[in-house]
Amino acid sequence: MESWVEACALDAIEQEGVIRFDHGGRTYAIFRSPGDEVFCTDGLCTHENVHLSGGLVIDYEIECPKHAGAFDYRTGEAIRLPPCVRLKTYRARVENGRVSIDLG
């Protein structure tokens, strides 16, 4: 079941950047890729529940600000230890300059 929620303006996210989005008691991370695509994952690192929005984004990778573990934000895959559990991902789209994510 689709459940699209408007999250922010595309311009609110720097290219190769991330922002935090809180909705329904949960935290998400929304990314803007080098190719101007948008992606969304759970917002907390699977290792120690640190907000990923404070991390460094390079290409298609988010580095956790606490222990420098990393994820591919397109797939949620943990690609550098210490995290070994992948992030949940959510579909994201841009319409009329606004980013929406499917939380369904």
Image (spheres, grey):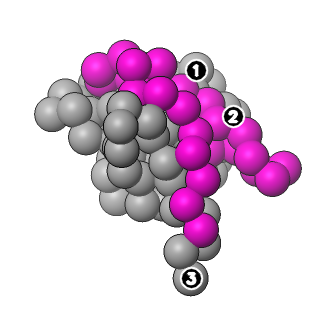
Image side of residue 8 versus residue 15, left or right? right
Where disc 3 sits, the SS reads loop
Q: Residue sitting at 55 percent across and 60 percent down?
A: 4
Q: Position of residue 77 (x, y in %)?
A: 38, 57
Tell me the quarter of the picture where residue 3 sits.
bottom right
Q: Nearer the viewer, residue 89 or 58?
A: 89
Q: Are marks 2 and 1 in contact (CB under 8 Å)?
A: yes
Q: Which residue is mark 2?
A: 50
Q: Residue at x 37, y 50 (%)?
A: 93
Is residue 75 one of those drawn in magenta? no
Give residue 99's position: percent from left, percent from top: 45, 40
Identity of the amino acid at label 2? Answer: Val
How packed is label 3: few (under 14 Cα within 10 Å), some, or many (20 or more)? few
Please determine whether, in this image, residue 63 is positioned above or below residue 29. Answer: above
* Residue receiving disc 3: 1
Q: Name above or below for residue 43 compared with residue 104.
A: above
Q: Which portion, as a residue range, is magenta?
A: 3-28
Q: Quadrant of residue 71?
A: top left
Q: Position of residue 101 (x, y in %)?
A: 51, 53
User: In front of the other: label 3 or label 2?
Assistant: 3
- Horizontal side of 82 relative to 93 (left or right) equals right
Q: Which residue is mark 1?
A: 54
Among numbered discs 3 and 2, the one appearing first in the sequence: 3
Whether residue 52 is visible here, answered yes or no, is no
Q: Is residue 59 left or right of residue 103?
A: left
Nearest to N terminus: mark 1 or mark 3? 3
Q: Position of residue 6 (x, y in %)?
A: 57, 45
Residue positioned most to the right: 25
Disc 2, SS: loop
Identify which residue, 60 or 99, lies in the foreground.
99
Q: State which quadrant residue 75 falls in.
A: bottom left
Compare residues 85 and 5 and report the one nearer the observer: 5
